[in-house]
Amino acid sequence: MADDPDQRPLVLLDGMSLAFRAFFALPTDIATSEGLVTNALHGFAAMLISLVRSQNPRALVTAFDLSGGTFRDAMTEDYKGGRAETPPEIGHQFDLIRGLCEVLHIPVLGVTGFEADDVLATLATWGRDEKMPVVVVTGDRDAFQLVEDPYVKVLYNRRGVSDYSLYDESGIFERCGIEASRYPLLAALRGDTSDNLPGVPGVGEKTAAKLFATYHDMDDLFAHLGDLTPKLRENLATYEQRARNNEQVMLLVRDVPLEFTLDTVTLGGWDRGEVDAFFDRFEMNQMRTRFAQLMKEGLLGTGAGAASPSKVPATTPKAPAKMATVVASPASVLSSASPVIAYRNDRAAVLDGATNTVALVDLDVLIEALATVAPCGHDLKELYRIGAERDRVMKEPADDTAIMAFLLDANSGRYELGDVAHRFLDEPIVTSAPSLFDSTSSDDTLLYEVALIARLREHLRAEIATWELGHVYEQIELPLVMVLGLMEARGIAVDATLLRTIAKEFTEEVASLDREIQKVAGHDFKVNSPQQLQVVLFDEMGLKAVKKIKSGYSTDASSLEAIQDEHVIIPLILRYREVEKLRGTYGAPLIDAVKPDGRIHATFHQMVARTGRLSSDGPNLHNIPVRSQEGRRLRYAFRPSEGWELAVSDYNQIELRILAHLSQDSGLLSAFASGEDVHRTIAGSVFGVPSDEITPEQREQAKAVSYGLAYGMEAYGLSQRLGVPVSFAKEVMDKYFTGFPSLRSYMD
Amino acid sequence: MATATGPQRQAAERQAMNSGIQGLAADIFKSALVRLDRTLRSEQLQARLILQVHDEVLVEAPPQEKTAVEAVMRDALTNAAHLSVPLEVTLHWGENWAAAKG
């Protein structure tokens, strides 16, 4: 990933196999207005973009099969005969993909009598001999045999357009259980359905790998059939010729005659006008923009022609063009104004955008430097927690690209770097292991990530400004990142003995309720089994079920609450479930959450709730019941540090005050301005009596409406809450709105 | 392939949500936390913000700092936003969360 061009790989594309993957990944309704299906072209173009961005290639070469047979046809009876009929919508797209490569000046090779695989094998071998890094991109496992450390890797497309694994020798061994160079042996026994090559019956990939862990090659294997189990021996003996033949078929040819040399192959040489015209012709505006960006960034080499009169929207992301230079001495980078940082475990990359230099340092060194400089990173909360755990004081963050992404798109729910880069920069998603980065060093990963964060920062900053989210970002969400990290590190002290006592009480109460319920039922049964409970309640006791479900009658909370006055067993069951839930959530789990320092360190989430509220887990402290006796009992166990005291503060009627502010209703505003009991004042207006004549009941009704409005409650909800008929609730609400007319227009 | 409207729509939704009651309440809380933690740190108090759950903010402090901390907390919370009506807070001390809840 350094700037030295010799480290950039030659990227070899298996055009046919990638075209098929693209075709099956995208719907065929991707088409021009004339109805020309272009889904594979779209997918292939998207693959090119992600390859260029992730691999930073020195050059790209594509190989295609030519029509007509290959030498392999003579070797087997029905080679590739079992392949499903080629779908009619793909044939013409091979030409479109060739056309795309041509306008981009990516060489397209094909040699009569050979497969694209053989061409790639030949090029990869040449590259290896020149000590040049090579990445073969394909959806065909045959290419695994080409992998050779340290030069040749295979970027295997598992499916779709963005699900890749990058394999080096250890990666192939991990995946297949055999060395890359001996892969054809394994494939020969296993067979290959996509090439219609049957293998040896009863021998799968695992067995084949085991056999060739013991035996060196086919000769060695067949010389030792006597050592094998009878069944295996018989199958191998029967199909010996097939296995040996398969091996020959699967061995790729590394010396295909090519009128092509590697010396001259580079990126670039395109004409911008031609590229734009190509995308215009196939009505691919987004691709046009994205390739324009690649050309602008220099990632496709250099070419002719300025941008043609632009259809390119003004929002094209501006990203730095080049990978940064890695410097040996981190001092200047660490003291730059607001460095971009990425870290994993105890290693960090720090990028100074001004000089485009990057340093790799221990995490401790970075944390120390952050005493004086403010970092830009992705999801920095954890770093602040780690810093605080190591007793370091750090500056507030200068930028957090995860938080920016959350503000811009609170619905997506995923803010990992890969997801955000994919969403905002069209980077390939790298999620599942083994991933693109498995076999590269972690330093390379950090350098990639830090460059990505720098690009994201620039892009997202502009978006934040466009959507006028600057205030909420800079004043609230961004500094909160550090506050939450510090809160996590601090934790809260608990009385573990008391927690254990409470857990025991929960367990005992559950057991006693369990016994009591069975006693009332008159026989043993599993109270927590809905099926058995149905039988007891509705068949044996003859209680009236309120809700029918697929498997009989519902025993969920609302169904039971509706009949809780019918029989003494119902309240017992409801209580049983309540305590059982408390036991499960705040019994043992809360005790387990106590760390050796005697404190509970919950994790706080800033980017979860769409309302912007904070949440917590490990444990979820937000679910401790607010009002119940048990909730109160649990809160006794949360304490200040030894010898200290605890202050708890909350807002009075905050929702109602916000409602007054937003609606600007003069009655509500003056109710708060008077400084008197606000619910009483409101009730006075609603019921049209002086506030000192308001009954407690009226006050309660007005209060309920106030909160109901703040949470969007309607007459039905209010009637439930107050235990009054819906018509009466409606009447109270109408009176309320009459008393506070501006409120109604705000709510509407 | 028209994804361009996605983020735009969502950003617009975020603005709408932000202006709603729940969104504004959440922003006031978060703003209060930031102000509170910053001030406790800058005034070099030992007291520290340790928890925010629902509408409650928890701070632990050594006894000698109680007066100062209470002033900082009230200031941070009541000035977290400037609405047309004043923000009011309740604050209690205690030897555990239940007791301090009042």
Image (cartoon, coloured by chain):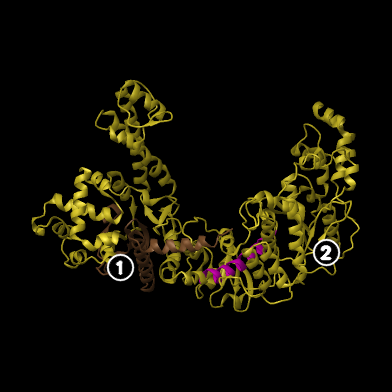
Left or right: residue A422 compared with residue A602: right
Which chain is rendered yellow in the image? A
- Res. A394 visible in picture: no
For the residues bearing labels 2 and 1, Cβ distance under 8 angstroms: no
Quarter the N terminus of chain A occupies = bottom right
Residue A336 % position (x, y): 56, 78
| Nearer-the-camera pick, A4 or A333 | A4
Which residue occupies 20% across, 61% down? A740
Question: Residue B69, labelled with which disc?
Answer: 1
Secondary structure category for the residue under label 1? helix
Quarter the C terminus of chain A occupies = bottom left
For the record, the magenta segment spans: A440-461
Question: Residue A131, labelled with which disc?
Answer: 2
Dot 1 alpha-carbon crowd within 10 angstroms: few under 14, some 14 to 19, many 20 or more: many
Which chain is rendered brown in the image? B
Residue A741 % position (x, y): 21, 61
Question: Residue A24, labelled with which disc?
Answer: none
Question: Magenta stretch containing residue A444, yes or no?
Answer: yes
Residue A468 % position (x, y): 44, 71
> For residue B43, which quarter of the picture?
bottom left
Dot 2 alpha-carbon crowd within 10 angstroms: few under 14, some 14 to 19, many 20 or more: some
> For residue A104, which quarter of the picture?
bottom right
Q: Provide the chain ID for the residue under circle 1.
A: B
Which residue occupies 62% across, 61% down? A427
Dot 2 amino acid type: Lys
| Cα distance between the residues tagged 2 and 1 | 66 Å
Left or right: residue A556 compared with residue A100: left
Which residue occupies 34% across, 66% down? B32
Q: Main secondary structure of the magenta part?
A: helix
| Furthest residue in direction front, as rendered | A34
Dot 1 amino acid type: Val
